[in-house]
Amino acid sequence: MSEDENNSETGRVTRSGSPEESGFIEETPDPLNEASPYSERRDSSHIYEINPSKGGTEQSAASSPNQLNRDEEKNKNILFSDANIADVTPLSKPEMSRNSVSSETKAMEDYQNVGFPSGEKVSPQTSKNQKEFDLEADNFAVNLEAKGLQEFPVDILKVKYVKYLYLDKNQIKTFQGADPGDVLGLEILSLQENGLPSIPMEIQLLHNLRILNASYNQISCIPKELLQLRNMTQLFLNSNLIEDLPAAGLESLRNLEILSLGKNMLTHIPESLSSLKNLQILNLEYNQLTIFSKSLCFLPKLVSLNLTGNMIGSLPKEVRELKNLETLLMDHNKLTFLSVEIFQLPKIKELQLADNKLEAISNKIENFRQLRLLNLDKNLLKNIPKKISHCLLLEYLSLSDNNIEELPRKIHRLKNLRQLHVNRNKMIKMAEEISHLNNINSLEFSGNQITHIPIEIKNCKKITRVELNYNNIMYFPVGLCALPALDYLSFNGNYISEIPVDISFSKELLHLELNRNKLPMFSEHLCSLTNLEYLDLGKNQIKIIPPCISAMVSLHVLILSGNKFEIFPEELCALKNLQVLDISENHLQKIPSDISKLKGIQKLNFSSNQFTHFPVEVCQLQTLEELNMSQASGKKLTRLPEELSNMIQLKTLDISNNAIKEIPRNIGELRSLVSLHANNNQISSLPPSFLSLKVLQHLDLRGNNLTALPSAIYSLFSLKEINFDDNPLWRPPMEICKGKQLHTIARYLQRADERDEKILEKIFNIVANNVTEINFEFLQQKLNITSSENSFPVKNTTPLNERIYHALIKWKADKSLLLTATALRDQLVRALNMIGAYDIMDKITALNLYTSAIKI
């Protein structure tokens, strides 16, 4: 499943200022002009729009994560009405994702943004009465998210009639002061992330409340006052500390349709839960349930049940009573078998059973004639029942991480199957019957023992994605080259040594991986893939690049790591659109100046090569954002060039595992630098310009020769991660740096500076009161101090100690920009030694001994 799903914005009012001036309260526009499709079921605390006028039988629960992501862009608003489950379940999509993902999981994941309808779009299925209700002039929503509120906003409720109130991320603990007349109109209330130890007792005043979201708090129980809200239809209490449900009183919530209690501490479900006769969606994911309570089986309208992440070992016989159940999520439990009664559920569309201990599936699965999605990943299955071929509507089948040796012969009857994932099993061949799956678009058979792919695979004209990593394939399957829609092909970890000319027919191919194969050369046939954007040929035996690579005009990412290159192939410099080049773990010694032709390059990896010196040619690349010159297994670099500062766009620099002694003085000119990895070198100090790296966030200087950190390191406000381990630091000492907290280091250095200034002041006084006129002349010469007669308008009658003190103060002012107080002290001591002022040295030594015994 893709993990980069975006949270949808939901049309909330987000202005600041007073209620009247800022528009916190805003009249809802005509929703008939803003009709939108269904919003997807995305997370466990979403407020859903449900419509009483539609049934749920025609909806498909097998939803595609990729498709859902696209739909989410279209459906920016979460809909509201009084309704039922039909509009909660998204329509079946024409394309499913490559990974097993439940639409219900999306609906029941931890909620982050509850949207309130300030001009929300209304579902096309909303009933006529509901539309009229939403068009009333006094339909208002108020969003007060993260306003630092500690009290219920009673003043705002007095300004206008409010129905939807959004109070997330505040510190509201009570509704004290709320006028019953003002809160009577509230229908939707969200109190997420308020640190609530309990639901305020005043909740009982909200007689018309339909939807309450109090997720992400510290609530330990459901109070009896909440049970008095008979109009409640949706209740979200995810991510709290609830250990028990009320044994009595739940029957009062007879209108409840959605109950979400994911990520709590429930250990059992009381019988009273079965009194919620209108409940349609129930989320109990990631609790501590060990038993599938029979009370769950007597919820006649239940459509979706989420028990993911518990410790349930079996299903009761009574599960057969859930005649309307469409979605059952039981991933990450301890199921060892499925009771046959589960196969008596005629409406099941989505069944998620990944990460259990199932050893077999009954042939009764043929009863699941409505099944769209079946996930059996991470179990102990050795075979799949033949009668799965009767599940004719099945679109998504995932069987990864089992012990399956072959698929049922009649699998070709699953004409609607779009995704088939059988990764990491014991398959020795891909059945020819798969070639009859006319609608298949994604095949994943990685981590098996397959030796060849049947030529008949070319009949699967709709395939867009094939993954066959880590098998025993020796010959590139030419059947795949005839697939007109194929855009993603992955063959890592096989034994392919030759690319056939047929590859040139794969005109739509965008992504190709052939890492860890036996390719002796970069085939010219690859150069015909003019639409290819991503090519991974790492860990092969390639030495040269053909000139025709210049035809690969769409190539953005090229990985050639772990090959046999001794000379940087200049042919690569013709790839004008190349953005990422990884040629690490080769035997390169230098880089040609033509590399400057890579005008769009952003990331370069030259790590673990054999450079005799830093390739200064790289510094011409002003578009470069990431450069890796780490030499963990290559020849060590000893210095960095001043030209490094030319890469003004550089954000990440990795020079770790070298023998670099110093960082360039102009390092501060890399104003875009965010991450610097310089661990395991011989760096002894940081140049002053280092403090100009104002956007630096990650700094790794482990294993160097640093003895002191610059005092003004605190000025690098953006630093988030620092590491100075394994350095001979004494300023600050290593025990101060071990916590890796910049403010602790900065505080120490600040106090150390103050102490060093005081010590230097005392030394100036010792010198001024003890140096003779003759020795002072010598001291001025050693310190390059201008004669006091020329420097200060002071008469000859001025006492000697004052003249000496003023001279030292001026000397310090001249040097302070370059030297710290400690460095000035050391320089002064050396000068005193040179002029033989040993009596003064004894006094200074005594002062140093005294101050060193005092901790900062």
Image: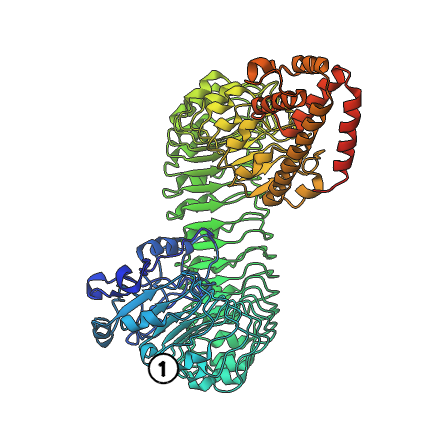
The quarter of the rendered structure image containing the C terminus is: top right
From this viewpoint, is residue 133 visible?
yes
In the rendered structure, the answer to whether residue 710 lies left or right of residue 845 reads left
From this viewpoint, is residue 57 visible?
no
**Residue 720 image position (x, y, % from top left):** 55, 43
Q: Which residue is mark 1?
A: 207
In the rendered structure, the answer to whether residue 661 lies left or right of residue 29 reads right
**Residue 528 image position (x, y, % from top left):** 39, 29
Residue 662 lies, with reference to residue 331, above or below; the image says above
Q: Nearer the viewer, residue 263 or 328?
A: 263
**Residue 630 image position (x, y, % from top left):** 60, 30
Q: How is the image coloured?
A: rainbow
Q: Nearer the viewer, residue 483 or 464?
A: 464
Disc 1 element: loop
Kindly indicate the quadrant of the structure image that contains residue 798: top right
Residue closest to the far front: 797
- How many marks the image carries: the answer is 1
**Residue 853 image position (x, y, % from top left):** 77, 39
Which residue is painted at 47% across and 52% down in the image? 3
Q: Nearer the viewer, residue 692 or 805?
A: 805
In the rendered structure, the answer to whether residue 414 lies left or right of residue 731 reads left
Identify the amino acid type marked 1: His
Mark 1 is surrounded, within 10 Å at the Cα level, by few (under 14), some (14 to 19) or many (20 or more) other residues, namely some
Kindly indicate the quadrant of the structure image that contains residue 730: top right
Residue 387 lies, with reference to residue 444, above or below; the image says below
Residue 781 lies, with reference to residue 596, above or below; the image says above
